[in-house]
Image (cartoon, rainbow, N blue to C red):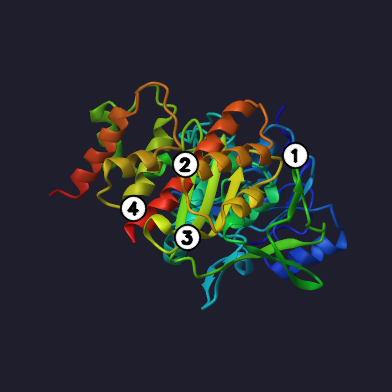
Amino acid sequence: MSHSSEHRGKCELSFTVNGKAETIRVFPMERLLDVLRNNLGRTGTKEGCGEGECGSCSVLMDGKLVNSCLVPALQAVGSSLTTIEGLAEGPQLSALQAAFLECGGAQCGICTPGMILSASHLLHKKAEPTLDEIREALAGNLCRCTGYMQIFEAVAEASRRKNPA
Amino acid sequence: MRSDPADYELIAPGTLQAVVALLAEEPGKWLPIAGGTDLMVQYAAGKLPAKKLVSIWNLPELRGIEVLPEEVTIGAGCTYTELREHDVIAHEFPLLASAARWTGGIANQNRGTLGGNIVNASPAADSLPALLAYEAELILTSVRGDRRVPYVGFHTGYKKMKLAPHELIRAICLRRGFSGYLHYSRKVGARNAQAISKVCVAALGRLRGTGEGGVIEEIRIALGSVAPVPLRLTEVERMVSGKTVDPELVREAKKAVAAAIRPIDDIRSTARYRAAVTANLVAEFLEQLRATGKAA
């Protein structure tokens, strides 16, 4: 990991976001969440609790699910980040996004980006998860609207579409 | 009040050698930060006193799990995800694998590290009772080299530990050879994910002889959240060793558990509840241990 020679003050950090190379000048302890939202305009990533409990700010960092509120910007240097904006291909929603819409997995929408990224992380590791595995994978994402059942169903539905029997 | 990032320094020297050199240069001035799952919470709340941080996330020298014939060496920078997904950890050290599985959620497991859990020194840390039960040893490193210490006794009081300001935990060593043992772990919390434990138990043991006459040959019981530090119940272990598990022994053990722990009332639970649950869990473990004799 590189860092600027000056310890105090802003430094230049580079990483890719949804496949696009980005270089920004921020304080190294800036939260990745704030960098994504304020410096890069990726406001799909939401802030819920700001302390790693609710999962609203989940993004993928080198394919691994992380809470972006708990990642200092400097630790994201050189990484490849995926936010909710990176899942659709043009107007074509990903299977998970479409399933969330159809199954009623989204209501107010604050938890939805994090839910979908957690689900996406799960489906990359395990294409056909059991209900228990879905529940465990989403246990770090809190939703105050749906009661969760439609969300679990949406993940199962997306898995079925990607892996038709 | 949220912290202002302009008030903080964070550097990432990139090698272990550079990090320990920095710690030696200005002891106590630099706070190592790995996955940030504890420190960034304090930071967000404006409660992180250290203003100079040095990143040890992804340091190659702290990564990886090495499986040797006699022991397993876990890099202090290993994440919970790496622990729970590692075959040898999952099969031979299930107490540690289960603690990793029920710490935080997946996102926290991808960032939280075993070394971080030790240094954060929460009495409620789920992985620490497992380290006590397996009699883990720690390799501490500094510019002067490595030194190896038993984990038991490392935490000396609430958030206090035997780690010099210029030292870093490099690895955690677990001796192998627990295949014939019963491994028992339970977390009692509002829920498994995210919730911090009200009580956490990691225990292992085995009987000598079978059937009704089986006696406890070896037993280790460790607890989290019931004292200022993770606790090994050595008195209780001594009391039940060499004996046959029967209702009378279980009753006596429960009394001894109550005498050994020092639970408190806090936002998560009460001392009374914690004491009752802890005694019941130890009783459940002893019952399961007795049952292993019947099965054999």
Chain for numbered disc 2: B
Q: Which amino acid is tagged 2?
A: Pro
Image position of A150 (left or right of B19): left
Q: Name the residue under label 1.
A: B48
Query: Comparing marks 2 and 1, which lies closer to the viewer?
Result: 2
Chain for numbered disc 4: A
Q: Name the residue under label 3.
A: B206
* Distance from Cα at disc 1 to Cα at disc 3: 44 Å
* Distance from Cα at disc 2 to Cα at disc 4: 50 Å
**Above or below, comparing residue B189 to residue B36 in the picture:** above
Q: How many labels does the image show?
A: 4
Q: Which numbered disc, 2 or 1, marks the residue that appears first in the sequence? A: 1
Image position of A64 (left or right of B133): left
Query: Comparing marks 3 and 4, which lies closer to the viewer?
Result: 3
Kindly state the secondary structure of the residue where label 3 is placed. Answer: strand
Kindly state the secondary structure of the residue where label 2 is placed. Answer: helix
The quadrant where residue B115 appears: bottom right
Q: Name the residue under label 2.
A: B247
Image position of B80 (left or right of B53): left
Q: Residue at 70%, 38% (x, y): give it.
A: B43
For this rendering, which residue is in front, B27 or B68?
Answer: B68
Chain for numbered disc 1: B
